[in-house]
């Protein structure tokens, strides 16, 4: 199989439409480990702009970068990402960059079932870094911990979102805090509130660093990438990486099984009332792997 962007695109569509057939393809792929980075935070904080400069920085280091934008309100094809024709050309001709958007699960948020398979596919296509951008307060943001091993929480001054973030438990999932738009006033105040929140937080081990960035001109991105690398190193050295892998695999299994159950139930219309329960359970348990 040709490992080019076009093939990957097609396979992802297949995964999204028919997860069962996808599992077989994915199983047969030679996969390598990749760093999966979650980028989350309130709408408009500058996440996509930041991802754009992260891509450039990782490309300089020679890494292949895949991006999944979950339910993007400002798409990557918009101003923030492909601002001018030169940049557009640069990304479209670069086989080392792949960007895909994906819907979230539904009105209540949460990640789409296919995200695990899409990430596995990207690993199979030799991507070294996979960045997942999610937006909106709620389940989508919390679920990112099941997918990413390093979660960046991107905040911007003046957003007034800090208190809300704390309530939603999102602060607890941040491995690195990013104060983006630090060219604007209010960055100091934001940093103070983050520090105050960290003090009352009950986490042990890793203390999340706070990095200031200006995504529009790339300021701070080098430092951000260093912090991500430090976090990866911490995960490996402390053994926590195994815990995170387990957490991810458990969630993945849950997604696969839920898919399977839904499919059997969708196909159960022909069953009689008497047989529905028995047959459904039998079919779910015997479902082809
Ligand atoms: N001044 C300033 N503006 C920025 C910075 N980063 C991003 N912006 C601007 O903020 C706006 C929103 O940026 P996006 O990157 O689309 O933000 P986002 O968080 O991805 O937004 P959603 O995907 O809609 O949640 C754009 O107009 C950016 O140009 C920054 O560091 N400083
Ligand atoms: Mg965005």
Image (cartoon, rainbow, N blue to C red):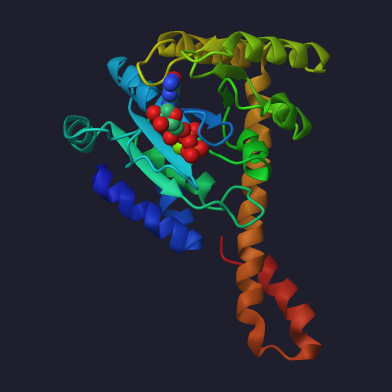
Task: Out of 38 and 260, give the one closest to the viewer.
Answer: 38
Q: Does residue 106 appear to the left or right of 56 in the view shown?
A: right
Camera sees residue 131: no
Quadrant for residue 269, please give it: bottom right
Quadrant for residue 191, please give it: top right
Task: Out of 17 and 30, give the one closest to the viewer.
Answer: 17
On screen, 159 above or below 283?
A: above
Residue shown at 32% from the left, 55% from the top? 10
Give residue 76's position: percent from left, percent from top: 36, 39
Give residue 281's position: percent from left, percent from top: 74, 72
Task: Out of 122 and 239, give the one closest to the viewer.
Answer: 122
Residue shown at 64% from the left, 49% from the top? 253
The C terminus, quarter of image? bottom right
Task: Out of 18 and 195, give the one closest to the viewer.
Answer: 195
Quadrant for residue 267, please give it: bottom right
On screen, 158 above or below 30?
A: above
Q: Does residue 72 appear to the left or right of 148 in the view shown?
A: left
Q: Does residue 67 appear to the left or right of 84 in the view shown?
A: right
Residue shown at 68% from the left, 35% from the top? 247
Give residue 106's position: percent from left, percent from top: 60, 57
Camera sees residue 263: yes
Looking at the rendered structure, the number of numbered marks drawn on it comes to 0
Give residue 43's position: percent from left, percent from top: 54, 37
On screen, 180 above or below 80?
A: above
Residue shown at 22% from the left, 30% from the top? 87
């Amino acid at each position: 199989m040709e490992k080019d962007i076009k093939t990957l695109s097609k396979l992802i569509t297949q995964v999204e439409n028919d997860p069962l057939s996808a599992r077989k393809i994915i199983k047969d792929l030679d996969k390598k480990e990749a760093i999966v980075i979650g980028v989350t935070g309130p709408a408009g904080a500058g996440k996509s702009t930041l991802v754009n400069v992260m891509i450039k920085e990782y490309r300089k280091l020679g890494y292949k970068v895949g991006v999944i934008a979950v339910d993007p309100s400002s798409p990557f094809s918009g101003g923030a990402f492909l601002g001018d024709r030169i940049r557009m050309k640069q990304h479209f001709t670069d086989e080392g960059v792949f960007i895909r958007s994906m819907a979230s699960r539904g009105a209540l948020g949460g990640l789409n079932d296919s995200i695990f398979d899409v990430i596995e596919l990207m690993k199979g296509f030799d991507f070294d870094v996979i960045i997942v951008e999610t937006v909106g307060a709620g389940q989508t943001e919390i679920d990112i911990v099941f997918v990413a091993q390093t979660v960046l929480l991107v905040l911007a001054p003046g957003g007034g979102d800090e208190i809300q973030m704390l309530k939603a438990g999102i602060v607890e999932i941040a491995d690195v805090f990013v104060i983006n738009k630090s060219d604007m006033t209010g960055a100091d105040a934001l940093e103070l509130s983050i520090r105050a929140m960290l003090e009352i937080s009950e986490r042990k081990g890793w203390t999340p660093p706070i990095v200031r960035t200006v995504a529009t001109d790339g300021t701070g991105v080098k430092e951000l990438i260093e912090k991500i690398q430090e976090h990866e190193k911490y995960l490996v050295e402390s053994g926590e990486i195994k815990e995170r892998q387990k957490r991810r695999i458990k969630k993945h299994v849950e997604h696969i099984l839920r898919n399977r159950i839904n499919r059997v139930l969708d196909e159960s219309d022909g069953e009689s009332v008497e047989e529905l329960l028995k047959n459904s359970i039998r079919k779910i348990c015997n479902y082809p792997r």
